Amino acid sequence: MGLEGKETSSFMRDFLDRYGGYAVIDGGFATELERHGADLNDPLWSAKCLISSPHLVRRVHLDYLDAGANIILTASYQATLQGFEAKGFSREEGENLLRRSVEIAREAREIYYDRCTKDSSDFMRDERHRRRPILIAASVGSYGAYLADGSEYVGDYGDAVTVKTLKDFHRERVKILVDAGADLIAFETIPNKLETKAYAELLEEGIETPAWFSFSCKDESNVVSGDSIFECATVADSCRQVAAVGVNCTAPRFIHGLISSITKATSKPVLVYPNSGETYIAESNQWVKSSGKAEDDFVPYISKWRDAGASLFGGCCRTTPNTIKGVAGELLGTLPHK
Ligand SMILES: [Zn+2]
């Protein structure tokens, strides 16, 4: 986007100001593709659909825009050049698939805007929805996501993996996503401080596109590896290109405490997009209930999280467009509460 210095750091604040001080992020993407019948039992996970069913990728983006999201994340979470090469794709084909993830999201945005001008429903007549600003965030899953063994929920890469290994792993992919026209980079489900440092150093190599850092956490004060969220958020705070810091794919019951820890480390905008509160079991590729309580409807907590200091809200795995409709409604106050 060619934003320079100070502008990059105020990017998210400016965006939030244009939409009443908050933003709605989309919901679970891969799990939503699965709900529509996609078989993602594959090392590429959601990125498999970039090859097999791009129309479904576009449709899920549109479903989230219809639900009220104003930031949508691309299907590139587990899309890596290394992963595509392992599946027999050439370097060039892998690069095209990465680019495609951004293009499909941009197409969905165009279709949505076009539809808005023709739709006359109450929802669309609301000025706050029509032509509301929509950002395309290029999803970058962690190195652990590429390993496709649930490592992004453990965060232990072993001693052989260094900051340099991680920078080398992510560098080309990030460049391709930026060049494809993403408005921001969503480094998500970050499992440890090592990868946080690698992303910060990578951005400082000269990437001017704003980014957000979003961590997967195992309790109220630690990311999944056991590193403290305060320390990870402090690394994020020190990086000029980081426009927002937060938490994703984490159980709703930990969110409130995590927001408190993050706001102690940074004054950058805070984002939260929890999962349904279930735990992913990599061996069986299943999500199982992890606490006695049902947590799938966290919408009633949104206003409390906002009071605690968060300003961007969405959902992660196993949340759906219905969740996001609830989130948007809660924030706008235009839809009936549950
Ligand atoms: Zn998730």
Image: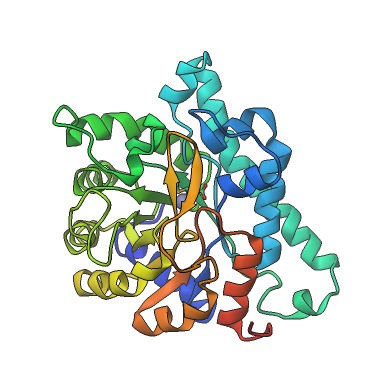
Q: Using residue 13 as the reference point, say whether residue 326 is left or right of it.
A: right
Q: Determine the residue located farthest toward the front in the rendered image.
A: 292
Question: Residue at the location (20% across, 46% down)?
Answer: 197
Q: Quadrant of the C terminus?
A: bottom right
Q: Quadrant of residue 283?
A: top left
Q: Judge whether residue 265 can be spotted in this image.
A: yes
Point out residue 298 in the picture as x, y percentages from the top left corner: 50, 72
Question: Residue at the location (71% across, 63% down)?
Answer: 66
Point out residue 175 in the picture as x, y percentages from the top left corner: 40, 36
- Rendered position, 279 above or below 179: below
Question: Residue at the location (51% across, 14% down)?
Answer: 90
- The total of numbered circles placed on residues is 0
- Rendered position, 70 above or below 136: below
Q: Using residue 75 as the reference point, say whether residue 145 is left or right of it.
A: left
Point out residue 23 in the picture as x, y percentages from the top left corner: 51, 71
Q: Using residue 143 as the reference point, say whether residue 64 is left or right of it.
A: right
Q: Nearer the viewer, residue 240 or 26?
A: 26
Q: Judge whether residue 1 can be spotted in this image.
A: no
Point out residue 88 in the picture as x, y percentages from the top left corner: 52, 13
Question: Residue at the location (58% across, 65% down)?
Answer: 70
Q: Determine the residue located farthest toward the left in the rendered image.
A: 159
How has the structure been colored for display?
rainbow
- Rendered position, 279 above or below 86: below
Q: Using residue 204 as the reference point, say whether residue 295 is left or right of it.
A: right
